[in-house]
Image: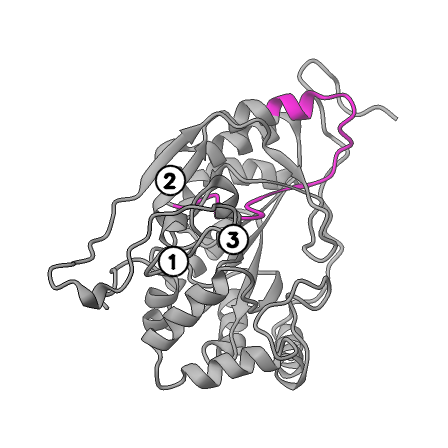
Amino acid sequence: MQNLPGRGAQFNTKNRFLKDEITREHVEGIDDWTITDIPTQYIEQEAKSIVNKVDSPDVGMLYSMNPYAGCEHGCIYCYARNAHEYWGYSAGLDFEQKIIVKKNAPQLLRKFLMHPKWEVVPISISGNTDCYQPAEQKYRLTRRLLEVCNEFNQPVALISKNGGMLRDKDLLKVMAKKNLVSILVTITSLDEKLRRVMEPRTTTAKQRLRLIKELSDEGVRMGVMLGPIIPGLNDHETQRILKSAKENGASFSAYTFIRLNGAVKLLFHDWLYKTFPDRADKVWHHIEDSHGGQVNDSRFGTRMRGEGNIAEMISQQYKKFKLLYGYTSDDWEFNTEEFKRPGEQGKLF
């Protein structure tokens, strides 16, 4: 079967919420069937809300907001793929090609922050899909969300793997001076060959290290996210990634272990056996061994860390190199004391 260049998924998985779907199957039975890439489609919508309460106790955030649904980056392992089914699309190619743009996100955030019952805690931008994916270059929704947060002195956490964040360096620098922003940059591999097939439309690791350096030089608190760590593919890179990020100004770090819930299991399996047939069995069985014989896990506390010998070895390596390169816990805290609504003088106690 012909591979689609620049895409992670190579087909659309079934949407579990839809009874009837149109599918194309058995390509080998049709002589003149060629597969061509479909241009990315931006679907503009007026959302009803933008800030979501996060009930999961193991993700390190209380509230999140995502200006885009779906993600053109095409990372084959992305857990957010399953959420695209709620919109009536597939977690496969649809997730990468049909990007929902919440055009009124900044207005919704302003309305949310104006509510008198809002008790200030940090809000994470990109709890699901990447807020600096290619759509941001056109729509600038993340920029406008940050402008609203800066106006209100609302603290935010950011996570991205896209060098486009540097477009907002001026604003992030201002927010950093007030301790209003903390950023994690995801680096899954320093191997460009692996990056290109696993995360086809993302920026290079070199560009991500540059992102960490340029923003940390401006006083922005920068960290590195190793996620996901996949045994047999990128687990041997933990030391190099932590070392390189530290040398470029990262001061804190985090990691997640691969889990393949829902349709991501089918997509990753297809990708793995087509892309790395020589080691696919080994990688797949390592993932199974780390999730009690399955490749998926929804249990809080273990789902993003795994369990068993392989997961424990990865955890120990991560802790060792985190300590070796000086990623020690610090007393840095978000500033929640200066939040103010337009017309107010600030928080009064």
Q: What's the amino acid at mark 1? A: Gln
Tell me the CA gap for discs 3 and 1: 28 Å
Residue under pointer 3: 82
State the residue at coordinates (38%, 48%): 94
Looking at the picture, the colour scheme in use is one colour
Residue 97 visible here: yes
Residue under pointer 1: 207
Of residues 141 and 86, which is closer to you in this image? Answer: 86
State the residue at coordinates (56%, 36%): 174
Quadrant occupied by the N terminus: bottom left
Q: Secondary structure at mark 3?
A: helix
- 69 is higher (above) or lower (below) than 32: above
In the shown orientation, is residue 118 left or right of residue 232? right
Quadrant occupied by the C terminus: top right
**Horizontal and vertical percent for residue 263?**
49, 60
Tell me the CA gap for discs 2 and 1: 18 Å
